Image (cartoon, rainbow, N blue to C red):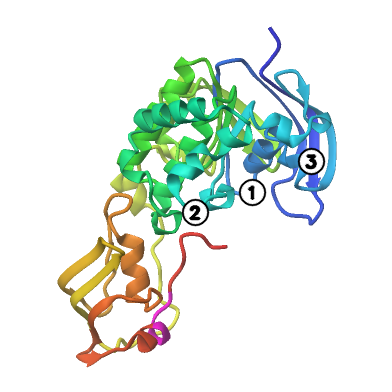
Amino acid sequence: MKDAVLLRDVTFQYANGDSGALNEVSMTVQHGECVLLCGASGCGKTTVTRLLNGLIPHYYGGALSGEITVFGRQIRETAIEDLAGTVGSVFQNPRSQFFCVDTTAEIAFGCENMGLPEAEIKQRLSKTVSEMHIQNLLDRSIFNLSGGEKQKIACAGVSAMLPELIVLDEPTSNLDLDAIAELRTVIAAWKAQGKTVIIAEHRLGWLSGLCDRVLFMEKGRISAEYAGDAFFSFTAEKLNGMGLRAFRASRNYLESKPGLHCIRPFESAGSISLTDFKFSYGKHTALNIRNLNLPAGSVTAIVGHNGAGKSTFTRCLCGLQKGFKGRVSIGGKMLRPKDMMQLSYMVMQDVN
């Protein structure tokens, strides 16, 4: 039986000179295998995934040499639309692969593009939603979903197309622990169905016992290959030396990291107080905070499951979300939304 994936002496350089170029990469993936691509940012993981789904060379231009085949098809000679039913992709930023404004239509979109009968599309939709436990996400606006919920919809849309190869590029970037566990269950089901799965990922611990092999990349090359069991026995210190995240960060490991030092003194205007702080998406109440005090000079973590309201809270606090209600004060001085925007800064989940 031919390899599901074959890369032989593949070299690629983006036309705009971006990082992530590849240098004489060779790899094979067997049918039904689950393979992890790992390495520091910019090592070439995402570029490999783009080769497999045809985005390189059919979308991203550049200098490409070497042999790339997926299930016997030469990628360079196969139109990207002809690969869609064979290779499914889940991108790091799910928003970049959405075409619809509501969730149910988005899950069905790929099947519709394949020209499947309406009855089969409905059957696939129902089965996928049930397997992924996302009934609560149906008939929702894409714009009102959290980052993790968007990723779930992206995975569901791909799963419904029943591809032979599924490529995931950092699929857990926006997921909480429960959602990661659900994704792991989905990938395990794909493996049980005989699908081939390739995952490019920074968060590694959740893949223990799931990946058959691990390919470690450095500076555009595959510098090491490990059996899954061997790789997931590595210590935090060894992973740190490879530039990888620990599977589970221990207190000793975290305390060994250098702290932050303030470059210049900062004088706070006072603590932040919220009273009757509320926001709703239509009939859905997203925030209902009666009283909250954030002490001056403190660092406060806002935690919760996907969709709990964390991002909505930060947008409202910065004055970026129109329509919120309540009173906000700093040091006893009441603030208008305009004032909140001038006094705050927000680092977005999606830097683009």
Residue 228 coordinates in the image, percent (x, y) = 49, 22
Q: Earlier in the sequence, mark 2 or mark 3?
A: 3
Identify which residue, 115 or 223, lies in the foreground. 115
Identify which residue, 14 or 312, lies in the foreground. 312
* Picture disc at residue 42: 1
Query: Magenta residues, as a range?
Result: 341-345
Please name the residue shown 33% across and 76% down the image.
Answer: 323
SS for tag 2?
loop
190 inside magenta stretch = no
Compared to residue 71, the image places residue 187 above or below, namely below
Q: Which residue is mark 3?
A: 57
Horizontal arrangement in the rendering, residue 54 relative to residue 314 (left or right) = right
* Picture disc at residue 4: none
Q: Which residue is mark 2?
A: 101
Please name the residue shown 70% across and 19% down the image.
Answer: 71
Residue 202 coordinates in the image, percent (x, y) = 50, 42
Residue ranking furthest to the left: 290
Residue 148 coordinates in the image, percent (x, y) = 40, 48
Compared to residue 227, the image places residue 318 above or below, namely below
Q: Hey, which quadrant is residue 162 in on the image?
A: top right
Residue type, label 1: Gly
Mark 1 and mark 3 in contact? Answer it, CB < 8 Å.
no
- Residue 26 showing in the rendered view: yes
344 inside magenta stretch = yes
Prevailing secondary structure of the magenta residues: helix
Please name the residue shown 38% across and 63% down the image.
Answer: 259
Q: Quadrant of the C terminus?
A: bottom right
